[in-house]
Image: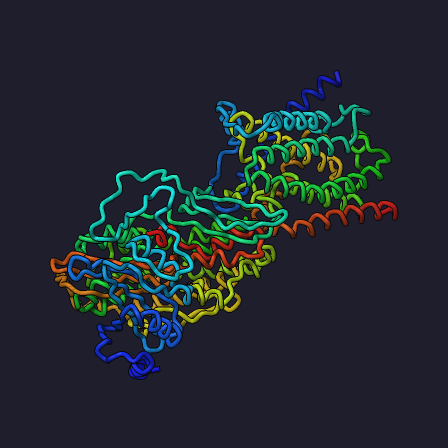
Amino acid sequence: MKYLEFKIAVLERTGLDERAFRESGSEIYIAANLENFHGICLLLHSILSSPVMLYFAEDNVKTSGVYTLRCGFLGKKIQRWVFVVVDIPKDNLNFPAISKDIVSAQLFEREIKEMFGLIPAGSPDVRRLRLHDEVWPDGYFPLRKEFVKPEKTNNTGKYYVFDRIEGEGVFEVPVGPVHAGIIGPGHFRFSVAGEPIINLELRLGFAHRGAEKLFEGKSAKEAQIFSECISGDAAFAHSLAFSLAVEQAAGIDVKENVKINRAIGLELERIYNHINDIGGMAIDVAFSYSSTLASIVKENILRLNEKLSKHRYLKGSNGVGQCALIKDKESRVCLLEVLSGAKTDIDLLKNILFSSVSFMDKVDTTGTLHRKTAEDFGVTGLAGRASGLELDLRRVFPGIYEKTSFEIIRGDKGDVLSRLNVRFNELAVALRVITELSGQINFSGKEDSPEAIIISGTGLGAVEGWRGPIIYWVKIGKEGKIERCKIVDASFNNWQALSCCVHGNIIPDFPVCNKSFDFSYSGGDL
Amino acid sequence: MKITVIILQAVLLIAASPFISGFIKKLKNHIRMRKGAPLLQPYHNIVKLFGKDETISKDSSYIFRIAPYVLITTAVAAALLSPSFFPSFQISGTGDIFIIIFIFALGRFFTALAGLDTGSTFGGMGSSREMFISALAEPAFLVSVFAASLAAGNTGISSLLPGGVFKISLVCSGLAFYLVLLAETARVPVDNQETHLELTMIHEAMILEYSGKSLALIELAGHIKQLVLLSLLVYIFIPVGSGTGFYIIKIVAVAAVTAIIEVALAKMRLFRVVDYLIFSFVLSLAAVTAFIMGV
């Protein structure tokens, strides 16, 4: 479907005026009102066959007396982000909920409600998400501009009620929020009958730091550092998505070399994380030899990162309009050397894992996430692809990847083995892509990118991080200060996949299911 | 005289038992290209734990408090009955091999009760899994030993000792015994001692609530149990050489095999353990049949 056809179809079926469309780069904003908002969202959801990718409010009470709501979908075929925009007057905070029809909007609406106090009328679930009832008093909405911190944030006397599963021999197993390993905080409430899991309810939000609020009032340069801390294992992807958003907002052009370097950084991050998770899956089933091998590969990549960017996790290597990882021919030689070593090790690791009967028995058919479930919950990234969904931002917006042999990797069964396979195949693709890209870097012209001048505007930046899409929507005010920054990490919606995939599995298999996804607590909790 | 030697032997066994655990750990880490903790680390751990205070849940009963003592008592009793460094001094008539098995069963019974006692979910989960596994492990255990005692014509430990020559029945029952030993000592592929994942634990989950001195006793009991089972294995089922030197060599060899198995295999799914233990049981039956056939 071409963009024009899409536009005509939408205009015809909604009866909107053409002026309701505003285009800016790859973003389209459709102005709606409270009456037709719900209808347009449903229409886009079905035409684009896209889940709600990002959905957020913005406080414009001071300037125009309204809260602005933006609901974004991804048009894979038209290669555009499509937003439905609606204004909610400050004296009537109700808006029609779309989550009763689109499941993937549910968490977003809960977030909007707790952060802004806007009420999604008709939503099936209005519980708080991150500001836990036990400690956060009513009536405080952090993302409103006039927000002042509550004086006291402990013991409100309320408590959270988990879903009760009743029946003979059914009991609950609470795990977390403090876990035995060095991982993030999250509470898992299992309802089990013997060993098989009947229900799993997740309660997250313990790592909530108010990241979006912290961005407000900062200059792009200051905020860049913050973006690297949203999810430490995806520091580069987050920082890249943020700079893309700022560049889009300020209309900054980026040089070819910078684009190549960014793609290389993104793939390096993918490699070390994928290999780390493969090792993690092995250790979770007590297959320790192979996990040691995986940790060696990871360490080699981290050392390479340090050599290239002076930081093991690639922090500080990306900026608005600039990124230089491969600065000279020497570092390119070093990069290729390390990667060819990694390739040998990864092949060996794959051999060990796939020839071990005891390991394969443990991962095959474990933790199946069905395609339809993944689709409904808006599961994206690696988790979605392993279940057969065809969604990869590197395919939708190829950019520099057009010059490489990049291919989208998918699985079909959606079990732990399928995710393991997708990881191995993505590793192979990443190694190949980096090698091809590094040959295209131009070292001749000495190009000093001047300090970019940030002007006001709004922009969206999205990259396919190793977990999945990381999306930043940024609004920059007159003095170059950030007014609103919406962050969506793939983990936000994907966490729901975990509670769906464990049904019918036994409790001892849960850790390996969890590791096969490896979602980010801090990325989801912000 | 004999009594003194036997007591001395038991003391030696108890003293040496943490070393075997340390050795297995060290070897495992060596295979995984790691340095690993020092060989004597299990001793340091026990000493450290003895010097610490404990936390006892206020919801627990006396069972929780006495379980470690029951456990250590059963382990020491088994150590007194088991042949180890000086096998020639074994007294006849002080008990037979089945006593040892049931002494361990007593210890396990109390550990499982203690796991349930605090009312924590992991303890209950561990106890239920432990009982599930031991219900299958014990028959296999008994039958494998039965095969050996058929050959000896007696179930007394001293008469089992001079095994003589390798026979098919002995190999089968020895293998069956070893499979059960891995399950009993909470090793891969049945359990994983190294894991931090509470949800996958079996033995560790039962004792999660213990700390300080109680934990030290439980850990020591675990080391002793492991060495007692290893001693029985090498004396009854590996009839090569005799004397203290051979004993030590054989123990170290079996421990090394255990370490290699632990590194090379992934843990089984919980319900696959059934197949594993039934295999062990069938092997023991095969051993009995083989003995009757005279091979």
Left or right: where does residue A305 sit relative to residue A204? left
Question: Which residue is at the far front?
Answer: A91
Q: Is residue B151 above or below residue B60?
A: below
Q: Which percent across, then down, holds residue A490?
A: 37, 60
Residue B258 can be seen, yes or no: yes
Left or right: where does residue A345 sit relative to residue B69? left
Q: Which percent across, then down, holds residue B26?
A: 53, 38
Q: Is residue B53 above or below residue A435?
A: above
Q: Which percent across, then down, holds residue A462?
A: 30, 65
Q: Is residue B255 above or below residue A413?
A: above
Q: Is residue A520 above or below residue B216?
A: below
Q: In the rendered image, which quarter contains the N terminus of chain A?
A: bottom left
Return the residue nearer the eye: A496 or A506: A496
Return the residue nearer the eye: B39 or A260: A260
Residue in the image at 48% along x and 65% along y: A373
> Residue A178 falls in which quadrant of the image?
top left
Residue A289 can be seen, yes or no: no
Residue in the image at 81% along x and 41% along y: B147
Question: Which residue is at the far top?
Answer: B1
Q: Which percent across, then down, holds residue A477?
A: 15, 60
